[in-house]
Image (cartoon, rainbow, N blue to C red):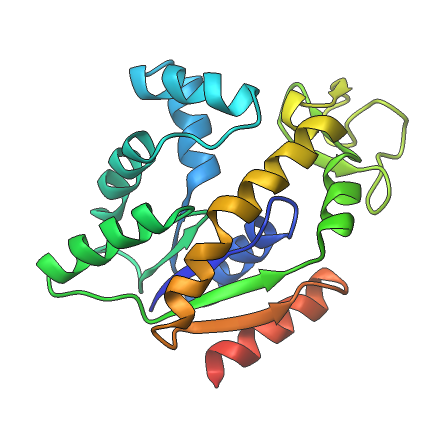
Amino acid sequence: MKIIFLGAPGAGKGTQSKRLVREKHLLQISTGDILRENRDNQTELGLKAQTYMDAGELVPDHLIIKMIFDKMDDTSHVNGYILDGFPRTVAQAEALDDMLAKIHDKIDFVLYLKVANENLIERLSSRYTCKKCGHIYNLNFNPPKNEGKCDLDGGDLFQRRDDKKETVTKRIKIYDDNTRPVIRHYKAKNMVQTIDGYGGVDEIFAKILEAISS
């Protein structure tokens, strides 16, 4: 099973991808995780990517593609993979199409988690992250028990620069301009399953499993 999982920042695709990985024994290839891994390890690619992330801009295609393609080679021990947050542009989608064609492989289908922009802005601008463990809280949906402190390790919570409202609004505008054409790219191939992104985590996951089964 080889899946592309699309959705705007804050739609919840990262959370749902992790659940699907456990349920179906898949490898999650997350753009965000790979970017953070490269950033934390201070790789050349990571340092370059961080400058764009801090400004709320998309990381250029050539940096993303190099990181993603390296990760896709490591799938022999699982039942497939989920591409989470990739491709973000039509150029990336076409590069992926070309690469898979060369190795006689293909994506089975595309999941699109759909949430309105105003809800995305509210979700993201309410997120806070633990400085110690990186656990994420949302002040509206899952606030910490003690204000400003992580429930897991007592670490201080802070708001990442790319979760501030002005940056969030810019991120979503960039998403609309760049990634919605990707959805159209795959709809033209009859590969897209649209999932309503409203509701509880369990409810949304049930919708995803139903879409996969159908």
Name the spot of residue 5 as percent of width and height, x first. Answer: 47, 58
Horizontally, residue 160 falls left or right of residue 54, namely: right
Where does residue 201 sit, x and y in percent of width and height?
A: 70, 61
Q: Is residue 164 visible?
A: no
In the image, residue 61 sits, relative to residue 115, either above or below, namely above
As displayed, is residue 176 above or below residue 193? above
Image quadrant in which the N terminus is located: bottom left
Residue drawn at x 65%, y 46% as measured from the top left: 10
Q: Residue extending furthest bottom?
A: 214
Q: Closer to the camera, 167 or 103?
A: 167
Q: Residue 69 appears in which quarter of the rendering? A: top left
Q: Is residue 206 above or below residue 97?
A: below
Residue 132, located in which quarter of the rendered image? top right
Q: Position of residue 38 (x, y in %)?
A: 38, 24
Choose top left, top right, bottom left or bottom right for residue 59: top left
Q: Is residue 27 visible?
A: yes
Q: In the rendered view, does 95 fall on the left or right side of 52?
A: left
Residue lying at the far front of the rendered structure: 177
Q: Which is more toward the observer, 142 or 214? A: 214
Q: How many marks?
A: 0
Q: Position of residue 115 (x, y in %)?
A: 68, 58
* In this picture, residue 112 sits left or right of residue 205: left
**Residue lying at 48% horizontally and 50% vertically, measured from the top left:** 179
Q: Residue at x 62, y 74 (%)?
A: 207
